[in-house]
Amino acid sequence: MDILRAENVSFSYRSKYQTVHAVKNVSCSFERAHSYAIIGKSGSGKTTLLSLLAGLELPSEGRVLFDGKPTSQMSRDAYRRDHAAVIYQSYNLFPLLTVLENTLYSMRLKGIKGREAQERAEKELFAVGITREQFRRFPPQLSGGEQQRVAIARALAAGNELILADEPTGNLDVSNSDQVVSMLIRLAHEEGRCVIIITHDLDIASRMDAIYTMSDGSLEQTKAFD
Ligand SMILES: Nc1ncnc2c1ncn2[C@@H]1O[C@H](COP(=O)(O)OP(=O)(O)O)[C@@H](O)[C@H]1O
Ligand SMILES: [Mg+2]
């Protein structure tokens, strides 16, 4: 069974002056142990769709189901804490917490503490190429690419089975980007997680098992697996 599914989902941003139909009647489904790319032009609705899949927003129409259960019927904080790890385009690191404290945070929410939390945080930070010397720094004391890698480590440390990432390699050089993409693919294929990334890099997209293309709020699958 799919882990995540969108059924005829639409979303509009409404203000006093205008309504933007950012996502239009989108249906898609995602399975465990597979990796997915969502590609498409800037402004086509990718980030909005990811927010809907991550439970940050609720659809104006249609529904998003995690393991068969609509996100509208769950505590959305609990959904992100327990199931959906989100890697934001703008990192969203806590500026007043160190690199290590940022990484421990998602685990603390789940009640993982002490030595186990410490070991997991170190493992994930090392895996994305953050050095022990950087553990005690604060996010503003890191480059954009380093902050992006900390955000990835923080998202992965909690061990959630659904990983949603908005341009996770947008600020990384080619070798770091390759490393992060390989890591995400390994999480899908070896640990059975479901990985969904937004990317504008077609080489990265082609390494994923399936590709969805977003265009003016609509989504179509442009590469499928058997
Ligand atoms: N908070 C917002 N308020 C109003 N319009 C928004 C907001 N966020 C995004 N939009 C609009 O929704 C559309 C889709 O945006 P977005 O999902 O960010 O696209 P993408 O991630 O593909 O660049 C764009 O037209 C954008 O201007
Ligand atoms: Mg975006």
Image (cartoon, rainbow, N blue to C red):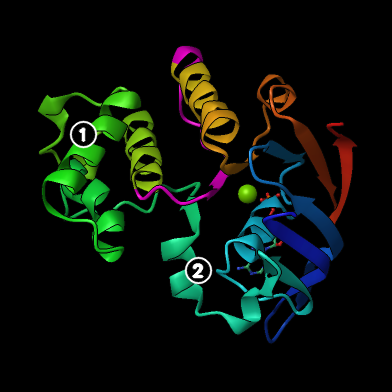
Outermost residue, top direction?
175
Q: Position of residue 181 (x, y in %)?
A: 54, 25
Tag 1 residue? 122
Q: Earlier in the sequence, mark 2 or mark 1?
A: 2
Q: Position of residue 152 (x, y in %)?
A: 40, 39
Q: Quadrant of the C terminus?
A: top right
Q: Which residue is mark 2?
A: 79
Taking the magenta stretch, the answer to whether it contains residue 156 is: no
Residue shown at 31% from the left, 63% from the top:
110
Horizontal side, residue 196 vs residue 160: left or right: right
Is 165 in the magenta? yes
Amino acid at pointer 2: Tyr
User: Farthest residue in the front direction?
Assistant: 1
Specify few, some or many for label 2: CA neighbours under 10 Å numbering under 14, 14-19, or 20 or more. some
Judged from the image, the secondary structure of the residue bearing numbered disc 1 is helix
For residue 128, above or below residue 153: above
State the predominant SS element of the stretch in magenta: loop
Q: Look at the image and tell me whether residue 40 can be seen.
A: yes
Residue 198 percent location from the top left of the image: 64, 41
Residue 72 in the image: state x and y as whole percent: 64, 81
User: Of the residues shown, which amino acid type is indicated by label 1?
Assistant: Glu
Q: Is mark 2 within 8 Å of ligand 1?
A: no
Which range of residues does the magenta coloring cover? 158-175
User: Is residue 58 placed above or below 22 in the rendered structure?
Assistant: below
Crowding around mark 1 (Cα neighbors within 10 Å: few <14, some 14 to 19, many 20+) is some
Point out the image quarter for the N terminus.
bottom right
